[in-house]
Amino acid sequence: MNSDRTAFRRIARIGFVLAPAMFLLPLIHPLVTQDVHPVLIICMTAAWAVLVSACSFAAMARTRPGGHPWVHQAWAAPVALVVMVPGGLVAVVVQGLVISAR
Protein backbone atom coordinates (compact mmCIF):
# COMPACT_ATOMS: atom_id res chain seq x y z
CA MET A 1 0.00 0.00 0.00
CA ASN A 2 2.81 2.45 0.83
CA SER A 3 4.59 1.75 -2.46
CA ASP A 4 1.48 2.94 -4.32
CA ARG A 5 1.62 6.20 -2.38
CA THR A 6 5.30 6.60 -3.27
CA ALA A 7 4.53 6.01 -6.94
CA PHE A 8 1.72 8.57 -6.79
CA ARG A 9 4.09 11.12 -5.23
CA ARG A 10 6.71 10.52 -7.91
CA ILE A 11 4.20 10.84 -10.73
CA ALA A 12 2.82 14.04 -9.18
CA ARG A 13 6.32 15.54 -8.97
CA ILE A 14 7.02 14.65 -12.57
CA GLY A 15 3.71 16.21 -13.62
CA PHE A 16 4.40 19.41 -11.69
CA VAL A 17 7.72 19.76 -13.53
CA LEU A 18 6.45 18.59 -16.92
CA ALA A 19 3.37 20.85 -17.10
CA PRO A 20 5.25 24.19 -16.97
CA ALA A 21 7.86 22.80 -19.36
CA MET A 22 5.12 21.76 -21.79
CA PHE A 23 3.64 25.25 -21.60
CA LEU A 24 6.81 27.36 -21.74
CA LEU A 25 9.17 25.45 -24.05
CA PRO A 26 6.90 25.71 -27.13
CA LEU A 27 7.21 29.50 -26.84
CA ILE A 28 10.80 29.26 -28.11
CA HIS A 29 9.61 28.45 -31.64
CA PRO A 30 7.53 31.65 -32.10
CA LEU A 31 10.36 33.70 -30.61
CA VAL A 32 12.71 32.42 -33.30
CA THR A 33 10.44 32.07 -36.35
CA GLN A 34 7.45 34.34 -35.60
CA ASP A 35 5.13 31.57 -36.78
CA VAL A 36 2.09 30.15 -35.02
CA HIS A 37 2.17 26.38 -35.24
CA PRO A 38 -0.92 24.36 -34.24
CA VAL A 39 1.11 21.50 -32.75
CA LEU A 40 2.70 23.90 -30.30
CA ILE A 41 -0.70 25.22 -29.25
CA ILE A 42 -1.91 21.67 -28.73
CA CYS A 43 1.12 20.93 -26.55
CA MET A 44 0.54 24.09 -24.50
CA THR A 45 -3.14 23.17 -24.11
CA ALA A 46 -2.30 19.64 -22.97
CA ALA A 47 -0.05 21.10 -20.28
CA TRP A 48 -3.16 22.17 -18.39
CA ALA A 49 -4.49 18.60 -18.39
CA VAL A 50 -1.11 17.35 -17.17
CA LEU A 51 -1.27 19.86 -14.31
CA VAL A 52 -4.72 18.63 -13.29
CA SER A 53 -3.51 15.04 -13.47
CA ALA A 54 -0.51 15.90 -11.27
CA CYS A 55 -2.89 17.46 -8.73
CA SER A 56 -4.96 14.29 -8.80
CA PHE A 57 -1.92 12.09 -8.18
CA ALA A 58 -0.82 14.37 -5.35
CA ALA A 59 -4.27 13.99 -3.82
CA MET A 60 -4.07 10.21 -4.26
CA ALA A 61 -0.74 10.20 -2.44
CA ARG A 62 -2.36 12.00 0.51
CA THR A 63 -5.25 9.57 1.02
CA ARG A 64 -5.15 7.79 4.34
CA PRO A 65 -4.14 4.14 4.45
CA GLY A 66 -7.08 1.91 3.75
CA GLY A 67 -8.76 4.67 1.73
CA HIS A 68 -9.53 4.51 -1.95
CA PRO A 69 -6.94 6.66 -3.75
CA TRP A 70 -8.43 5.98 -7.19
CA VAL A 71 -11.56 7.97 -6.29
CA HIS A 72 -9.65 11.13 -7.21
CA GLN A 73 -9.56 10.02 -10.83
CA ALA A 74 -13.35 10.43 -10.91
CA TRP A 75 -13.00 14.22 -10.72
CA ALA A 76 -9.65 14.55 -12.47
CA ALA A 77 -10.72 13.35 -15.91
CA PRO A 78 -13.68 15.74 -16.34
CA VAL A 79 -11.77 18.65 -14.80
CA ALA A 80 -8.84 18.03 -17.16
CA LEU A 81 -11.19 18.21 -20.14
CA VAL A 82 -12.81 21.40 -18.84
CA VAL A 83 -9.55 23.25 -18.16
CA MET A 84 -8.26 22.50 -21.63
CA VAL A 85 -10.73 25.02 -23.12
CA PRO A 86 -9.41 28.09 -21.26
CA GLY A 87 -5.94 26.57 -21.46
CA GLY A 88 -6.16 26.53 -25.23
CA LEU A 89 -7.32 30.13 -25.28
CA VAL A 90 -4.45 31.14 -23.01
CA ALA A 91 -2.01 29.27 -25.28
CA VAL A 92 -3.24 31.12 -28.37
CA VAL A 93 -3.14 34.50 -26.63
CA VAL A 94 0.33 33.92 -25.15
CA GLN A 95 1.72 32.83 -28.51
CA GLY A 96 0.15 35.88 -30.14
CA LEU A 97 1.67 38.14 -27.49
CA VAL A 98 5.10 36.55 -27.96
CA ILE A 99 4.93 37.01 -31.73
CA SER A 100 3.67 40.59 -31.52
CA ALA A 101 6.24 41.55 -28.88
CA ARG A 102 9.12 40.58 -31.09
Image (spheres, rainbow, N blue to C red):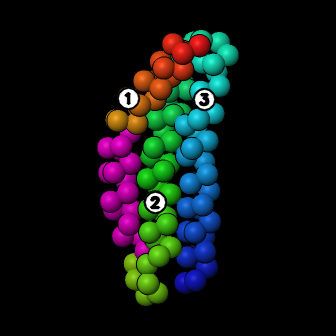
Q: Residue furthest toward the front?
A: 101
Q: Amino acid at mark 2?
A: Cys
Give the residue number, with chain letter if any, for mark 1: 89
- Determine whether 55 is above or below 79 in the image: below
Quadrant position of the N terminus in the picture: bottom right
Quadrant position of the C terminus in the picture: top right
Q: How many C-alpha atoms fall within 10 Å of the one at disc 2: few (<14), some, or many (≥20)?
A: some
- Determine whether 34 is above or below 77 in the image: above
Q: Nearer the viewer, residue 22 or 96?
A: 96
Residue 46 appears left or right of 79: right
Q: How many C-alpha atoms fall within 10 Å of the one at disc 1: few (<14), some, or many (≥20)?
A: some
Q: Is residue 73 covered in magenta?
A: yes
The secondary element bearing badge 2 is classed as: helix
Q: Amino acid at mark 1?
A: Leu
Residue 67 appears left or right of 9: left
Q: Residue at x 55, y 68 (%)?
A: 8
Q: Position of residue 24 (x, y in %)?
A: 59, 35
Give the residue number, with chain letter if any, for mark 2: 55
Give the residue number, with chain letter if any, for mark 3: 26
Q: Which circle's residue, 1 or 2, is located before the other in the chain? A: 2
The secondary element bearing badge 1 is classed as: helix
Q: Position of residue 58 (x, y in %)?
A: 49, 66
Q: Amino acid at mark 3?
A: Pro
Query: For residue 32, what is the image quadrant?
Result: top right
Residue 37 seen in render: no
Range covered by the magenta-colored residues:
69-84
Q: Residue furthest toward the right?
A: 32
The secondary element bearing badge 3 is classed as: helix
Query: For residue 20, what is the image quadrant?
Result: top right
Residue 10 appears left or right of 51: right
Q: Position of residue 5 (x, y in %)?
A: 55, 76
Q: How many C-alpha atoms fall within 10 Å of the one at disc 3: few (<14), some, or many (≥20)?
A: some
